[in-house]
Amino acid sequence: MLGLIKLIQDIVRSLNSQGTPGQLAAGMALGAALGLTPLLNLHNLLILAAGMLLNVSFPGFLLGWAVFVPFGFAFDPLFHAVGTVLLINTPALKPMWTVWYNTPIIPLTNFNNTVVLGSVLAWVVLYVPLYLLLRWSIKLYRERVYARLKRVRVFQVIAASKLYNWYRLFRP
Amino acid sequence: MKIFRWKAVGTLAGTILVFALLSWLFLDTLVRRGIEKTGELIVGAKVELAYAHVRLGAGQLVLRGLQVANPRQPMQNLLEASDLVAAINPLPLLEKKLVIDSLIARGVRFDTPRKTSGALANPGETSSAISEQLKSWADQIRFPSFSLEGLGKAIELPPLNQDSLRTVRQARAVVQFADTARRGWEAELHAIDPRPKIDSGKALAARLHGINTRSLNVQDLAQNVQTTKATLAALTSTLDRMRKLERSVDSGVARMRAGVGGLEDARRGDYGYALGLLKLPSLEGPDISPALFGTRALEKMQAVLYWIRIAERYIPPGLTARTHDGPKRARMAGTTVLFPREHGWPQLLLRRAALDLALRGEGAAAGDYQARLTGLTTEPAIYGQPFRLSAQRTGGRVAVRDARLAGVLDHVRAPVRDSVAASVAGFALPSYDLPPLRARAGLGDGITQFSVQRRGDNIDARWLIRSTNVAWQRLADSSGATGGSRKVDDLLWRIVNGVKDVEIETQLHGALDHPSLAVRSNLGAAVTQGLRKEIGAQVAHAEQIARARVDSAVSGQVAAARQRLGSVQTDLQARIAGQRGELDAVRAELEKQLKGLTGGIGIPKLPFQR
């Protein structure tokens, strides 16, 4: 566990985020893709690359991944239904899928799986609303919750511990 | 604010490198597991691979120690191969497709014993469904039992349980289907309610008939044309629904007719069943071969049907999108859809393969063979060529007169056409234990021929075993038979011991879903003839009693099934056909009138008009 925390700290040190609510929200919304969609697919490698290369909060990216994993599992039936409509029940889209399916590299994304397609599409649609919602929540947290939290005795004790190093990644 | 973190490029490159390194390290394991899982999905039994190695640079895949279990006999391997080397085309891999330009397999052996069971706890959905369908088909086939224990005893037939009679079950199914389907058809007819439309159409046609178009002004003419068109549209829509209903009823009646038609066959089976309860064989038919060889023949033909269905599922004709379950993972698997395209790569293609086969044992067929396969693919429509296989003998322990195998699976387009023929002469045939005859037939060297032909949904298969030098051996009597029973044993022994040439033929014929199975043998015919001569009178008397009991047990249900069929045919089917005919006639008349109204000026056909 400590190794994991250390790893996260190292990543943060090397990819020093500016730490604004917008950056943290953008990172979390991007990381949500890894949680919402089945992990071992090519598109997630691209999203990981985006999370590392774009100037968003990488710890936020990892947090977004972790937070949205349960949502991914919970909404799989919904993603499957969306994917089924698009891949099977919409004949107008078939020519497009056929071209994609027979184009090098694209099939490695597994877009032709109902759960993968449905979840990726859901993430794409939700990205902007998720970003806006997260940015607003983080602002609210920093203004109201964090300001009070740092005066609490228990929090001060924790702050002195190693765990605080990890928590500090997300403070303003 | 900067958008990109260029400093992270190095970290990203390092991460990708780690991914690539891990993939490379575990590639062999992933390929091995992939082959095992895919094979298990297709075969429906364990597929094990001892070693797999991918040489990406050389485009080569090396496999060792392949074992494919037999789904129907889990303690046997369907095949084993010691070494397989495949030359892979790397480009299709970028589309997640596997194209093997050539495959060389050595040490391929069939039907080898396994140390552990090859059954899967959860076989694939497809293989389970096929096995289930075949089991249900096989359960419907009842071979008459062969027992002579009842000879010389008083004829006391126990009460027949109606549920154990196939005729009753089949008749009930017809009645149930007829009642359910009829309710649905009546409701649909009620919803369509064609009568008012027919009447209004007729009334309009009569009114238009009496109109002189020259006396109408433009406005009246336009109104009449409009009304006629609207009525025609309504009639066409009703007619479409009526035609659909009529097709449904016709198909339902055909199904019922087939069910009722099969009742006589079922009844014959029940006669045999009732005689079996008396421990006497039926001597009514040409021979008792089904009682002697039926079970083994059925097993053989079930395997044939299983593989034909598997081929149908995994080598489908045409280019329609096809679906299968997604990959197994912690998340929901979903459905994976394949979108084949002409001039693309098939999902899987084995262009050609050369296999060195070995048949085990010391018999005449044991030895080395060479087989060739070409064009094995999951999308024959893309490849454009049928799958062909052939095998011939290259060396053996004992001289064999002939050993051949040739097959073509043409699934390029529908209807699919499969044809496989195998023939081995001089093959050491197995011994047959025939407990009902208290004898073992050592068939010795003989001929085995097997052929299967499939055209669309119809199948014809034939399996023939012929031996001209049968050695008979009397089976030890474990029952300690005395007296009358001993006489029966002696009688059977006299009959079979005189038969030196044995020919057993199994034929499968008809619709792939429920083909009929016939088993014929000169041995069965000889036994029937011999028994008829010696004990014919007694069996005939017992048969009479059994028939009467079966007839009385099934007559009610059979009559009910026939009545339902008759009622649907004469009442509902005729009514629907009549009303549809009226609709046709009214529509034709209105079209004629419409033409008259418009003075023969071509009115564009409505999109829904036929």
Image (spheres, rainbow, N blue to C red):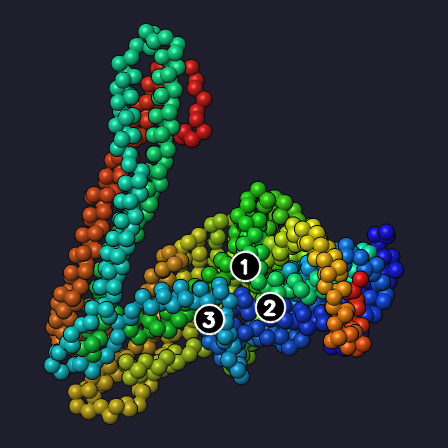
For the C terminus of chain A, the image quarter is bottom right
Task: Select label 2 or label 1 by which is in front.
Answer: 1
Q: How many marks?
A: 3
Q: Residue at x 35, y 41 (%)?
A: B244
Chain of the residue under the numbered disc 1 shown in the image: A
SS for dot 3: strand
Badge 2 is on which residue? B330
Where is residue A167 drawn, in percent x and y?
A: 76, 70
Give the CA separation, mark 2 to mark 1.
13 Å
Which kind of residue does numbered mark 3 sit on?
Answer: Ala
Q: Are marks 2 and 1 on the same chain?
A: no
Query: In the depicted view, which residue is nearer to us: B115 or A34?
Result: A34
Going by the picture, which residue comes out furthest to the right?
B7
Do the residues under discs 2 and 1 have CB atoms within 8 angstroms?
no
Which kind of residue does numbered mark 2 sit on?
Answer: Ala
Which kind of residue does numbered mark 1 sit on?
Answer: Pro
- Residue B93 visible, this orientation: no
Task: Select label 3 or label 1 by which is in front.
Answer: 1
Instruction: In the rendered view, tell whether residue B479 sits above or below residue B503.
Output: below
Mark seen at residue A77:
1
* Relative side of B537 to B176, left or right: left
* Relative side of B193 to B92, left or right: left
Badge 3 is on which residue? B425
Q: Residue at x 42, y 15 (%)?
A: B601
